[in-house]
Amino acid sequence: MTDGPVVTAARLGPGHDGRAEVVVDLAYPNGGRTQLSIAQEAVTRALDAAGLTSLDELAGRSWTVLVAGMPPIGLDAT
């Protein structure tokens, strides 16, 4: 078991700019819950880096699996 948040679900959702985003539900060890909206491109990179092929495979994994899809701070991801 991880010490931090765990992904409980992930699904496609609408982004504020009209592009698809992935909505990720997280559960914390203390019972707290939250949702993140992540650019579809970032999630695609994270899935590839983790060797996963679908959003469903994120469930039960540490939220840190998503970090592989994030651009370095201060760099434009486009």
Image (spheres, helix red, strand yellow):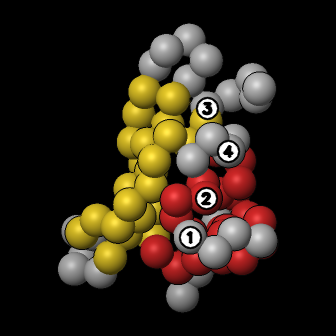
In this orientation, which residue lies closer to the viewer: 72 or 9?
A: 9
Q: Which residue is mark 1?
A: 54
Mark nearer the viewer, 2 or 4: 2
Q: Is residue 15 left or right of residue 42?
A: left
Residue 57 visible in this rendered orientation of the protein: yes
Which amino acid lies under the numbered mark 2 shown in the image of this protein? Glu
* Residue 33 at x, y percent in the picture: 43, 27
**Eyeballing the image, is 36 above or below 78?**
above
**N-terminal label among 3 and 4:** 3
Location of the C terminus by quadrant is bottom right
Q: Which mark is residue 61?
A: 4
Q: Are marks 2 and 1 in contact (CB under 8 Å)?
A: yes
Q: Which residue is mark 3?
A: 5
Assign a secondary structure to mark 4: loop
**N-terminal label among 2 and 3:** 3
Residue 72 visible in this rendered orientation of the protein: no
Label 3, label 4: how many angstroms apart (C-alpha)?
Answer: 9 Å
